[in-house]
Amino acid sequence: MKPVLAVEDLTVTIGTRRGPAHAVAGVDWAVRPGETLALVGESGSGKSMSVLAATGLAPRTARVAGRVHLLGTELTGLGEDRRRQLRGRHIGFVFQDPMTSLNPVLTVGRQVTEAAEEHLGLTRRAARSRAVELLELVGIPSAGQRVDAYPHQFSGGMRQRVVIAMALACEPDLLIADEPTTALDVTTQAQIVELVADLQRRLGTAVVWITHDLGVVAGIADTVAVMYAGRILEQGPVDAVFATPSHPYTGALLAARPDPAAGGAELVTIAGAPPSPLDLPAGCAFWPRCPVRGDARCEHELPPLVPVSAGHQVRTFYPQPSDGERQ
Amino acid sequence: MSERQRADLGTAVPADGTAHGGVPKQREPGEVVAELDDLAVWFPTPAGLVRAVDGVSLRVRRGETLGLVGESGSGKSTTGLALLRLVDPTSGTVRVGGEDVTRWSRRRLRALRRRVAMVFQDPQASLDPRLTIGASIAEPLIVHRLTDGGAARRRRVGELLDMVGLRGELADRHPHELSGGQRQRVGIARALAGEPDLIVLDEPIASLDLSVQAQIMNLLRRLQRDLGLTYLFIAHDLAAVEHMSDRMAVMYLGRIVESGTPAQIWRDPAHPYTAALLSAVPVADPQVERERRRIILSGDIPSPVDPPGGCRFRTRCPQARPECAETDPVLAEVDPDHRAACLFAKEAVRAMRST
Amino acid sequence: MSERTINREGQLRRALAALRRDPLALTGSLVLAVLVVVGVGGSWLAPSGINEVNVDQMLQPPSWAHPFGTDELGRDVLSRVMVAARVSLQVGLVSVGIALVVGVTLGLFAGYYRGWLDNVLMRCMDVLFAFPVLLLAVAIVAVLGPGLSTAMVAIGVVYTPIFARVTRAGVLSVREQVFVRAAVSVGASDLRIMRRHVLPNIAAPLIVQTSLSLAFAILSEAALSFLGLGVQPPDPAWGRMLFDGRGFVTDAWWLGFFPGAAIFLTVLAFNLVGDALRDVLDPRQLTVSEARRSTA
């Protein structure tokens, strides 16, 4: 199946007072219809920036290079108007904080269908009934009345449902969810995760889910890409990556969570901090913190992404567990 | 800390206050450092009186970690603030080191805040951007006149930085020059400066990256082991509370709904809310995630201005029965040292898990 | 505290560097520098005495001997403008100093403690604020009697509410910050928190407000002197000279022009520097108009 959105060799460089910051330093990924791609990483890993840049939402100070295909159309080189049109029609966005995604002085009904009115040419009356339909779709009780309420009259979880309804208004081919549950409680997070999975099954939408939470990834993703310092260090089918994490960074991240089954053992930590995007090392960006810590080659030479099994790639000279140990 | 040591310290018993007045069972009871008895903290707001904390009793004993877990609006942070008297109790008592501090004057409270220290959620916001790291850490030393003169103070600041794993020269830096994890270490150093009897850790890892969370949790445990510290560890992250605590309590809408050891609560939750919370925590294993059946709660936490009568959880409880609207359940023992505030404790959880 | 000075120096250095880059601010700073030199050394630098009456030389237009011309008594206008700079600076500094100390103290307590104290203090400030600036100053001078010191007190009183409001607005936002709660949690006293945490964090808007107020204070002094309520003759003051020159506008334009130009340049310079400082210190800081809104 052809990808909905594909990104090749994407780089994002942001001009700062102290020089260029390499927020994304060469990233390839693709998401197919009905599939969920999880981009996972810690803050500053470039996971959000790669998606914003691919969809033309990078800040003005950012220089974006590389190729981006949306449903087979090359986006790079298109005019801003055409790009906005394609984005509005085919991509829905859900961001972390539902309160800032909503305009406090408009009713939720108006906001949910605002984009649809523009891109599908709905009348006000049609838009209103479509809004009710969408609010019902995302599980808002008594949507017929709630459609005229204002965002502050909703709880955090309900607001995020409204934002999801908004994102789905144009029946997008792709839903981009940038840390959509980070600001929510666990029980609400479970509701939202369930909702998105259900909508995806019913509508066949492709999803790019950006998160730092490996637990959420395990629950929603088909494929996962682990990002660090602007690059993908490991990517592949979610089962393969979680069962045999092959990059030392992925392994360390998985081990860093307290495991209730393990009793009170000391947690595995990763020493130090990620490199500054102003000064990315020539070799492996994770090398200074790496528990395996290979050799001079790691320090000076950028490891390529190499396959370890079907669809499972890793950017290291020393895949873990080493080849001999792998069954 | 080894498993055995943890068990030895497992003595925090949230006092139930009302129904079960008898002496709670304890293994090797340590001295009670701080105690809340039927505490209520209500805030007036334009929408009405918010009952942030509404009848919470707990005890923290020397050398242990009491974990407090709950979602937003559960009142867990307000409970922590009450121990430093950073909020004024509406009713109930706050005792620290055996003294009733509920009605202490502002002046006396300043001395209390040497004995109970606090670490905040957002390390960036909790440090004055205009002060150096050293000046922030030295503040308790100056306020309580704990060191004589600048040289002694600088030496102590150096010691404190060393304890939390930071280099001494960071004392001259400003918060914006540090990473998130380093800033939280500074927050911990400041809390240690007055050698407090109790440290309230209010979501100390919530705004940190995963790998840094592990560093901070290890640091806190090491400090506790080396210095014999006592913690109240407040978090929404069940796995973190389980990992850090000797005893833990689960809060919902201003009340403690369940308390016990982490193992009891993790393996055998007695309150339906705890069970739902546990089932909502994502596990970093796709196989497990695919096969597990979640208990998805409907709706949201009700408004603390107008909490439901009877059991507060009944409006979202998948096992709510008519009786739940009539009786307000008290924390009752379901196993030794394991309490739950549910009329159908355990039974309801079994029913939820089998349907 | 050595740490604190380092921080202040860092900020000062940043501010100076930014001022250097901005040509308008640089011009403003140069004008201010000249003003300070003239203000301090005016009586020595002035080519002739300010009260050297020379009837032969009366109402001479600008010339090499008298670059700003002479007045109706033959006094050198340049010398009088230079010496008057001291008065203007003095009035500006003293009156803004009064406003700063009183206003910041009131604003700090009102914003920190809120409640009835806040209500009483800020309603008093509202009353002061409701009067037109000059009318209020005139009223105060009328009560206390004309003269330099009463003019300074009057102008100080007039500008106190502005500082109280800017301070209070800043305090209201800073006191909600977690680091203030953290300071309370280690047992710091209210006074210590105000001095050590709140004031340094609202310094930026106060510095900007000070430089802008200096300009307005100098203008007010000129106005009071123009009305004969400030500096008394024969001492020179720009406003008074402007007043005296008004009868000669057609015959001897220089009598009014040069003191007027001095007022204009000084006020402009303070405003340019104030605006630049605002951008350097904090783009989001509050000035009078925002402070006015936030007291509602």
Image: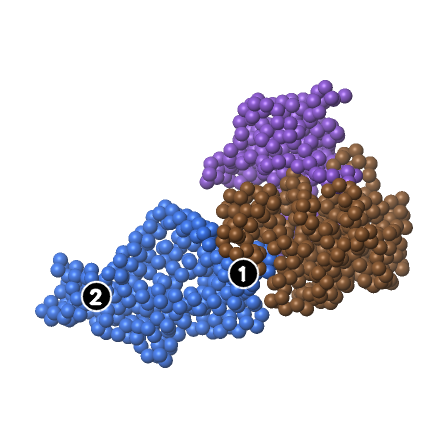
Chain colours: A purple, B brown, C blue
Badge 2 and badge 1 both on one subunit = yes
Nearest to the observer: residue A277 or residue A326: A326
Q: Is residue B84 left or right of residue B334?
A: left
Query: Which residue is located at x 79 percent, y 43 percent?
Result: B4
CA separation in Å, label 2 and label 1: 48 Å
Packing grade of label 1 (10 A; few <14, some 14-19, many >=20) is some
Percent position (x, y) of residue B281? 76, 43
Q: Secondary structure at mark 2?
A: helix
Is residue C184 visible to us here? no
Examine the rendered structure and indicate whether residue B352 appears above or below residue A299. below
Q: Amino acid at mark 1?
A: Ile
Query: Which residue is located at x 72 percent, y 55 percent?
Result: B76
Quarter residue C150 falls in: bottom left
Percent position (x, y) of residue B23? 84, 59
Is residue A327 visible to us here? yes
Q: Amino acid at mark 2?
A: Arg
Q: Chain of mark 1?
A: C
Examine the rendered structure and indicate whether residue B200 appears above or below residue B327. above
Image quarter in which the C terminus of chain C is found: bottom right
Q: How many numbered marks appear?
A: 2
Disc 1 target residue: C193
Comparing labels 2 and 1, the label whose residue is closer to the camera: 1
Q: Secondary structure at mark 1?
A: helix
Percent position (x, y) of residue B171? 52, 47
Examine the rendered structure and indicate whether residue B146 appears above or below residue A11. below
Q: Is residue C46 left or right of residue B33?
A: left
Disc 2 target residue: C80
Query: Which residue is located at x 28 percent, y 58 percent?
Result: C35
Nearest to the observer: residue B242 or residue C222: B242
Q: First in sequence: mark 2 or mark 1?
A: 2
Q: Is residue C240 left or right of residue A221?
A: left
